[in-house]
Image: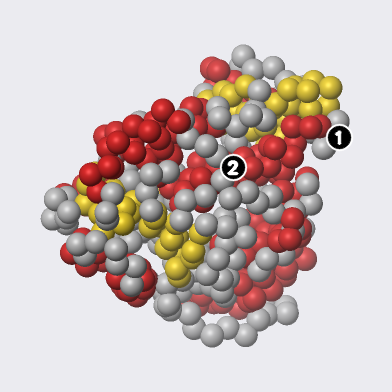
Amino acid sequence: MSGAVPLDPLAGSAAAIASCLQRLAHDPDNSDVITSLGAILQAAGDDEKALACFDRALQLAPDSPDAHWGRAKAWLRAGRLREGFAELEWRPHARPWQDALAGVARWDGSPLAGTLLAVAEGSVGDTLQFVRYLAGVKPYVRKLVLLCQAGLGRLLAGCSEIDQLVEYERDTLARVAGDAYIPLMSLPHLLGTSLATIPQSVAYLVPPYQSVDAWATRFAGHARKLKIGLTWAAYNGTQRDPVRSVPLKHFEALTREPHLKLYSLQKGRSLAELVASGLSSRIENLAPALPDFAETAAAIANLDLVVSVDSAVTHLAGALGVKVWTLLPFSADWRWLTGREDSPWYPSMRLIRQPAPGDWAGVARTVAEALCRRRC
């Protein structure tokens, strides 16, 4: 590979790296293999060497979306947000709403005397993180319509800047009219976001007041305890994401602390782990009472702390301004940057990172030690 980067073996990635290097020895200018090598290095947390691979791949194939996407994540994780969000525009754009918006102009940020369709994309966590930008968009448009994922409508209906909400499906999108559209994750680039200009509000989402009051009544019996919401499993689409998920057994020590009351905010198939672990009598399962994100938000608003893996729940707690400890793998997602215990996106958030790849036990010890110091 011309301009190759010297590589050290990386735990868990050595075989994949060796395979790429072997292929490059016979085909040194194969941009796809160079990009794959960069992705492997990036997943292992070596952004410097990964970035060199992406740069080289783009010299050979300037229009490679995978190489641009890899470089975007590397720059964003390094805190180079202006460059990273510009590069993020190369992300895949195949979305459920794409066909429905054919023929609608993409908004360029100029004043619009009509209807702007802001379209959520990616995961629910992405939507909860980037919906903050709509407050800055509203002054430039006459009407602002947000197309969002199912389950978010009742929560986001509390955002005063949103004039209309559509929980999108193909049949509903066919009936939405607009003069221009903008993907929600394109707003940081359009508005020139840097670390210093991230729109920050301690609480930019507000759950329904009636639901908040109802949860206050439900939790009243544990007023003297530290009430903690727990989410241990993350999902990538519909599949459990093993890299971001913590085995529930690591939290067993917390369930023995008499000053703590633990509530499970977990939903989906990972709830089976609560029963299998034998902890269901010590961690109260709230899932049956959480039909949507508005109700989850109302419950979280009554908690003292949320402890969660990188999932929609951690974004929700941060957007509500509730104290949240986010548990991160050694090589975390780009939005959490590197080497920080705080997040510029959420003032109420603390980041707790794996000290070594796969070391969730170390993360759980940090959580347990911190909570033991906060005895009531």
Viewer-proximal residue, 339 or 119?
339
Q: How far from the left and from the top, in percent, is residue 225? A: 27, 55
Q: Mark 2 and mark 1: span between their CA atoms?
A: 24 Å
Q: How far from the left and from the top, in percent, is residue 9? A: 49, 83
Q: Which mark is residue 204?
A: 2
Quadrant of residue 41 within the rendered picture: bottom right
Quadrant of residue 367 within the rendered picture: bottom left
Residue extending furthest right? 110
Q: How far from the left and from the top, in percent, is residue 370? A: 36, 71
Q: Residues within 10 Å of mark 2 (few under 14, many from 20)?
A: some
Q: Which mark is residue 110?
A: 1
Q: In this view, does 145 lie above or below 127?
A: above
Q: In this view, does 332 lie above or below 215?
A: below
2 or 1: tag closer to the N-terminus: 1
Residue at 64% x, 42% y: name it: 132
- Closer mark to the observer between disc 2 and disc 1: 2
Residue at 33% x, 61% y: name it: 246
How many numbered discs?
Answer: 2
Please, what secondary structure does the residue beneath circle 1 have? loop
Viewer-proximal residue, 354 or 62?
354
